[in-house]
Image (spheres, rainbow, N blue to C red):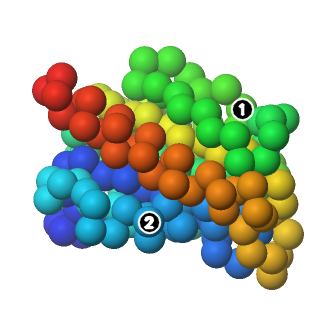
Amino acid sequence: MSNSFKSVRIIAIGNTDRGDDAVGPAVVQALQGRLPESVSAFEHNGEVAGLMDCMDGAEAVYLVDAAAMGLEPGSLRAFDASEKPLPSLGGAYSSHALGLSEAVELARALGVLPPVCRVFAVEAATFEAGEGLSAPVDAAIPKVTQALLDAIAQEDGNA
C-alpha cells in the first residue's frame, strides 16, 4: 500500500462504466477540496484483496458503494461495521466478484478492519454497462457527501 494514504480514509467503491455503480467515484469528486488534511479519499474497484490493503493501518475508513437493498433508488443507508456484520448489500448485483459485506467480514477475520468502519450504501437503479448515473442516484450525491463530512466531523470530535 502507498504511504500516501492517510489514517482516515474514504474509499469509494465502484466502476464508472456501470450505471449507478459509479456513485462512489462521483462522491469522491464532490468531496474535492472539502476534506480535512488528515483525510484521504480515493476510488477503488472493490477487488477484495486490494480493498483490504486500503483498509490496513487506517484509524478509520468510510466506504461508499452502490447497493441493491430493495429501497427507492438514491436512498442512503449508513452502517457502523466496526462492531457487527453488515447486512447483505446486494453485491451480486454489482461488478464486484464479492460483495462489500463479505469484504468487510474477511477484513475483520484477518484483523485488518480499522477500529472505525462506516459504510454508506446508496440504493442503485441500474448497474448496466455503459450507462451513467440514474437521475435519483445523481440527485443523492450532495446528501451522501454531506453525510460523510458529518460522520467524519462527529468521529473527529469523539477522538
Which is nearer the N-term, disc 1 or disc 2?
Answer: 2
Residue 67 visible here: no
User: With respect to residue 151, does 29 lie above or below?
Assistant: below
Would you name the residue on which mark 2 appears? 30
Residue 19 visible here: yes
Q: Residue at x 50, y 38 (%)?
A: 119
Residue 44, position as x, y percentages in the image: 49, 65
Q: Given the image, on which type of amino acid does mark 1 rest?
A: Ser
Q: Quadrant of the C terminus?
A: top left
Residue 144 horizontal side relative to residue 152, left or right: right
Task: From the image, state whether disc 1 or disc 2 is nearer to you.
Answer: 2
- SS for dot 1: loop
User: With respect to residue 24, does 105 lie above or below?
Assistant: above
Q: Which mark is residue 39?
A: none
Residue 46, position as x, y percentages in the image: 57, 59
> What is the distance, in whole Å, between disc 1 and disc 2 at their CAs?
27 Å
- SS for dot 2: helix
**Quarter of the view holding residue 32:** bottom left
The 10 Å Cα crowd at callout 1, few under 14, some 14 to 19, many 20 or more, is some
**Quarter of the view holding residue 13:** bottom right
**Quarter of the view holding residue 58:** top left
Q: Quadrant of the N terminus?
A: bottom left
Foreground of the two, 88 or 65 = 65
Residue 35 horizontal side relative to residue 148, left or right: left
User: With respect to residue 151, does 97 lie above or below?
Assistant: below
Residue 23 horizontal side relative to residue 150, left or right: right
Residue 62, position as x, y percentages in the image: 40, 44
Q: Given the image, on which type of amino acid does mark 2 rest?
A: Ala
Q: Residue at x 52, y 67 (%)?
A: 25
Task: In the displayed orientation, state which residue is furthest to the bottom.
Answer: 130
Would you name the residue on which mark 1 appears? 88
Q: Residue at x 53, y 28 (%)?
A: 79
